[in-house]
Image (tube, grey):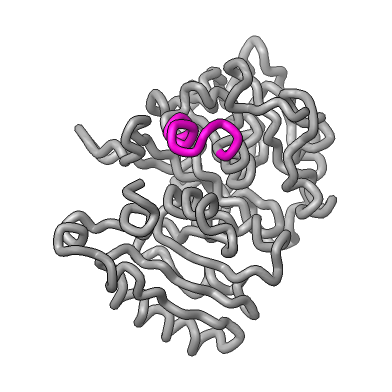
Amino acid sequence: MRKSVVRSKPGTSHYRLPTSGSGLSSHYGLPTSGSRLSSDSRLRTSDLKLPTSPELFIDAWYANNSFVDYDKNNFVQYLIARFGFDVADTLVGRYRIGTHSHWEGATVFWQLDAKGNLRTGKVMLYNKQTGKRVKQPHNHITWMHTLISKQFSVSSVQSSVGSGQFAVSSKESSANCPPQTANQQNSANCPPRTANFQASSANCQPQTANFKLRQCLFGEHLLPEAPHIPVAIVESEKTAIIASALMPAFTWLACGSLDGLNTDKCRILAGRKVMLFPDVNGYDKWLAKARQLQRENPALRIEVSAMLEQHATEENRKQGVDIADVVFGGF
């Protein structure tokens, strides 16, 4: 019988990214026993086949070490309260939800593309009781490529994934992390470090001259496992996760914001049937965007749901609610 991560003691996890090139679809099922997947199920730097172009990605170490401490993860605790342990456990594994201690209780929504590459991760803080984003005293949103960049932009800095601390130094290694070169395999407990840590189109160093972030749709990694299931796209990662539990007839993805839907992200959807579910104040904008995407990619079959336009009240419009708020019973 599978041991649930959300029931496990703090610091344990069995959600690991698959080894590159071994077939993504075979790794999306949850393990049948144990609190962790075997080390062979992790995406290792030594196994990662980087493209011949200068396109780099965030090392899987950062994601694999975020799959811990769900008892401290406010969003996961909210999912448990709403759906129960078993459904929450499935959602955490399906969407590869991580934990980060940049803020106490923070969540990482990893952008894992269809080839298994980590593009970036959005770090957000939620209220565990209401499931709403924490916006006071400021909006609690940052990015993994930004946090990782800061580790390499100073001589020595501490950061964290999960609740454990790790140190990165450009001059000397920490006591627990031996010096590493580009040809050495990373220690399981140490972040990847190279002297020439660079960034180009999709990596994690926005402060370098070559950096150009290339995001993908949140949940894109789910597409290969269900090539014939229609795709639904919403703005927020939270909405995609909740909707996937309540309307499993779709593969639910998120573009991250009202303006997050673009041609580059949607190329992966060519030949798929796609339904857009904009937030209540975004219908007109997404309708225009859908027409543009259709012109640019004729192989894309895309429609825009008018569900919120038909059901939202004036108060809903003032609040800027999404499909989860209105259609799915006040989440």
The quarter of the picture where residue 9 lies is top right
Q: Principal SS element in the magenta part?
A: helix
Q: Is residue 3 above or below residue 275?
A: above
Q: Position of residue 193 (x, y in %)?
A: 65, 32
Name the residue rendered at 44%, 71% in the picture: 276
Q: Is residue 274 above or below residue 149?
A: below
Please give the range of residues in magenta: 75-87
Q: Position of residue 82 (x, y in %)?
A: 44, 37
Is residue 81 in the magenta section? yes
Name the residue rendered at 41%, 67% in the picture: 277
The answer to whether residue 212 is visible is no
Q: Kindly give the residue lying farthest to the top in the view shown.
A: 175
The answer to whether residue 242 is visible is yes
Of 289 and 80, nearer the camera is: 80
Name the residue rendered at 48%, 54% in the picture: 243
Name the residue rendered at 49%, 25% in the picture: 159
Residue 43 placement, left or right of 100: right
- The N terminus: image quadrant: top right
Q: Position of residue 171 (x, y in %)?
A: 58, 22
Of 164 and 305, nearer the camera is: 305
Q: Position of residue 272 (x, y in %)?
A: 62, 76
